Image: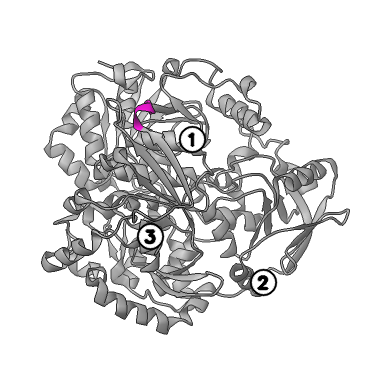
């Protein structure tokens, strides 16, 4: 996994609450068997007008936000479906960081699996930044994972909280499965103990299911 | 000693190891796999040369992409076909049990788990699907995960987790006539909001919950994620045990007796406390209909479409305005005046035999209104078979409903069952997001009973007073 230490980048604003993963990437793009190339589906329905043409008002269609690496948005971002295609599509578009006043649990978790940092800031901090992004062409933020800060162009530091384990994995770009496999002995010991307590949980499903 | 909640008991029996900061390696007993969120996980295993730790703890089924029409014709959409074939290939390569598209046991992943006895009390169950919360109805800790974690569980049978907080949602009293678990969960989401449960596992308690059938409890737990909670659960009782007994994957004979002995302790101790408690009275819950583009935008059938001008919170007002514009609704119009074009009875929320029995009996001797297209999609091949044995298909067809093959179908419209722009649907599914059932489609979430009444009348009606 790609490590995330610090980025300084152009910010794109999505000034909406409760953005669900069906909006981030609609279902017709979930038929892929790959993780890449999902940019085309990102906010697909919102990018278009009723007649099917591109909506010039939508932020992703505006030249000034091309090349943005930080997405700024509002409460409960990424709610709904567990589809990891949502962070994959954002990454494919070039976003490495999403800043919001809150996230839905599964989306938040999925970001960390992909070298992407979700940052929770206070609602008033997000609102102030949202105003500034819209008013200021070329608005940049610096997101520093090590120091847990987001720094605005006028040098205001907004601190964010992050779970230390997740921070470490992301900062060092660690392979999560590899880390768990280091505890193979503990897993095996658990299985032995548990099998004695609850043997019915260890029946191989394949033995109980004949062919239909 | 402080008592433990149901959640505490399940969590603690699954801790493999815990770091001082609370980061926990949690053992996962079972995983369900479907075609949409697994290809990249299997690809990851192949690229890293890893094998599933316990292929015999995993069950796979295609459900999202499968056609609900004649299966012998195969899948027309080439991308959907590749995805289903990829699942078949991966299951073959890794020795995982698959119920293929033409297997009678095929169905929506959250319907077949309980149906097969795969879902058991006290277990941890995951699936790359947010509605995995459904399985909590059996007193399991069941939650949706992303594809990277699907791979993680395949490789290690574990997940790295932080302990969530606990929320009790207590519903006491008796539900009104024809009000159901669907109305209860929609009312709960309307009360706590779509982010109200974020960071929590919900336990549903109270006399109204105990009175629900297993099917009803599944409907309830299914939509916990729509309240922001990754998992919802109901403590197992004699109904749970009776439901599980004799199912293909349920423990047999002495093992079953041994399991039942353990399951009886799977309940929250009298002196245990939750991080938060929400209470409701069942009598206060009217049949619910969603009016907006988020499951929290819901109200009773006896209410009116909200008026944004009366909302003081600016965010909420803007969200309401936007939702009403998308939904094509006028503020203050009675909910019963909303006319519909399509009715969908199905999905992991409401496609089990009990749902179909109730819906078919309400449809009996009636006719779907002119201009309304109504479809019934059973949750699994076995549900379909049972419904046909009971003659439910005939009741539906005589009333003008389409009777289809099992799958996710129009809940998310990944197959050919799609709403056209502007079409309005009374749906027993779980999400009314913009475009969920088709770009520009308008979804109203309701119970199966409310869906049948809407199909017959062409608009929403209060099922409590419907003849």
The residues bearing labels 2 and 3 have C-alpha atoms spaced at a distance of: 39 Å
Q: Quadrant of residue B41?
A: bottom left
Display coloring? one colour
B215 relative position to B147: left or right: left
Contact, mark 1 vs mark 2 (Cβ under 8 Å)? no
A42 relative position to B226: left or right: right
**Callout 3 and callout 1 share a chain:** yes
> In the rendered view, would you say B209 is above or below B367?
below
Q: Chain of mark 2?
A: A
Sequence-earlier tag: 3 or 1: 3
Front-most of residues B275 and B194: B275
Q: Quadrant of residue A152?
A: bottom right
Magenta extent: B282-287
Residue of label 1? B191
| SS at circle 2 | helix
Residue of label 2? A171
What quarter of the picture does the N terminus of chain A occupy?
bottom right
- Asked if residue B356 is among those painted magenta in the image, a careful observer would answer no
The residues bearing labels 3 and 1 have C-alpha atoms spaced at a distance of: 28 Å
Contact, mark 3 vs mark 1 (Cβ under 8 Å)? no
Front-most of residues A151 and B454: A151
Q: Chain of mark 1?
A: B
> In the rendered view, would you say A201 is above or below B101?
below
The residues bearing labels 1 and 2 have C-alpha atoms spaced at a distance of: 39 Å
Labels 3, 1: front one: 3
Q: Residue at x 54, y 47 (%)?
A: A79
**Callout 1 and callout 2 share a chain:** no
| SS at circle 1 | helix
Can you tell which mark lies on residue B3? 3
Labels 2, 3: front one: 3
Residue A65: x and y in percent read 77, 48
């Amino acid at each position: 996994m790609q490590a995330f230490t610090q980025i300084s980048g152009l910010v794109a604003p999505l000034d909406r609450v409760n953005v669900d993963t069906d909006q981030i990437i609609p279902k017709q793009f979930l038929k892929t068997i790959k993780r890449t190339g999902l940019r085309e589906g990102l906010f697909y329905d919102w990018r278009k007008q009723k007649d099917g043409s591109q909506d010039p008002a939508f932020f992703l269609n505006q030249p000034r936000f091309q090349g943005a690496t930080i997405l700024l948005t509002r409460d409960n971002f990424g709610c709904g479906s567990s589809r990891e295609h949502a962070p994959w599509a954002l990454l494919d578009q070039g976003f490495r960081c999403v800043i919001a006043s809150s996230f839905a649990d599964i989306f938040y978790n999925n970001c960390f699996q992909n070298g992407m940092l979700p940052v929770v800031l206070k609602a008033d901090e997000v609102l102030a930044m949202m105003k500034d992004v819209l008013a200021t062409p070329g608005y940049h933020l610096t997101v520093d994972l090590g120091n847990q800060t987001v720094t605005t162009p006028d040098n205001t530091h907004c601190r964010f909280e992050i779970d230390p384990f997740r921070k470490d994995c992301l900062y060092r770009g660690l392979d999560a499965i590899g880390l768990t496999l280091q505890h193979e002995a503990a897993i095996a010991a658990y299985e032995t103990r548990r099998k004695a307590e609850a043997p019915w949980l260890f029946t191989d499903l394949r033995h109980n299911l004949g062919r239909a | 000693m402080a008592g433990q909640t149901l959640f505490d008991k399940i969590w603690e029996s699954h801790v493999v190891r815990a770091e001082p900061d609370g980061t926990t390696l949690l053992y996962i007993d079972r995983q369900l796999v479907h075609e949409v969120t697994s290809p990249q996980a299997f690809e990851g295993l192949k690229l890293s040369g890893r094998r599933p730790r316990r292929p015999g703890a995993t069950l796979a089924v295609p459900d999202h992409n499968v056609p609900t029409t004649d299966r012998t014709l195969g899948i027309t959409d080439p991308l959907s076909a590749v995805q289903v074939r990829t699942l078949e290939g991966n299951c073959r390569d890794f020795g995982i049990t698959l119920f293929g598209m033409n297997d009678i046991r095929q169905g929506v992943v959250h319907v077949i788990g309980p149906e097969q006895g795969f879902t058991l009390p006290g277990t941890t169950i995951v699936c790359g699907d947010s509605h995995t919360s459904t399985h909590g109805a059996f007193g399991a800790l069941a939650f949706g995960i992303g594809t990277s974690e699907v791979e993680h569980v395949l490789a290690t049978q574990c997940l790295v987790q932080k302990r969530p907080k606990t929320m009790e949602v207590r519903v006491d009293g008796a539900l009104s006539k024809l009000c159901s678990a669907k109305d209860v969960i929609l009312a709960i989401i309307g009360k706590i909001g779509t982010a109200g449960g974020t960071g929590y596992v919900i336990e549903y308690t109270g006399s109204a919950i105990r009175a629900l059938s297993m099917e009803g409890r599944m409907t309830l737990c299914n939509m916990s994620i729509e309240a922001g909670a990754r998992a919802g659960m109901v403590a197992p009782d004699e109904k749970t045990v009776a439901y599980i007994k004799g199912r293909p994957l349920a423990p047999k004979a002495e093992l079953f007796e041994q399991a039942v002995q353990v399951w009886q302790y799977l309940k929250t101790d009298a002196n245990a406390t939750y991080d938060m408690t929400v209470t409701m009275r069942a009598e206060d819950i009217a049949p619910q209909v969603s009016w907006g583009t988020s499951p929290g935008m819901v109200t009773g059938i006896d209410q009116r479409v909200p008026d944004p001008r009366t909302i003081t919170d600016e965010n909420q007002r803007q969200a309401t305005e936007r939702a009403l514009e998308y939904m094509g609704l006028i503020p203050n119009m009675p909910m019963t005046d909303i006319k519909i074009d399509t009715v969908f009875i199905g999905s992991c929320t409401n496609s089990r035999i009990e749902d179909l029995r109730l819906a078919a009996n309400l449809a009996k001797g009636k006719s779907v209104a002119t201009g309304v297209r109504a479809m019934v999609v059973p949750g699994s091949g076995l549900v379909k078979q049972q419904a046909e044995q009971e003659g439910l298909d005939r009741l539906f067809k005589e009333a003008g409903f389409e009777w289809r093959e099992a799958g996710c179908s129009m809940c998310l419209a990944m197959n050919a069952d799609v709403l056209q722009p502007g079409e309005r649907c009374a749906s027993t599914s779980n999400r009314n997001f913009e475009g969920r059932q088709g770009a520009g489609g308008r979804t109203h979430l309701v119970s199966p009973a409310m869906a049948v009444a809407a199909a017959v009348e062409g608009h929403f009606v209060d099922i409590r007073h419907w003849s």
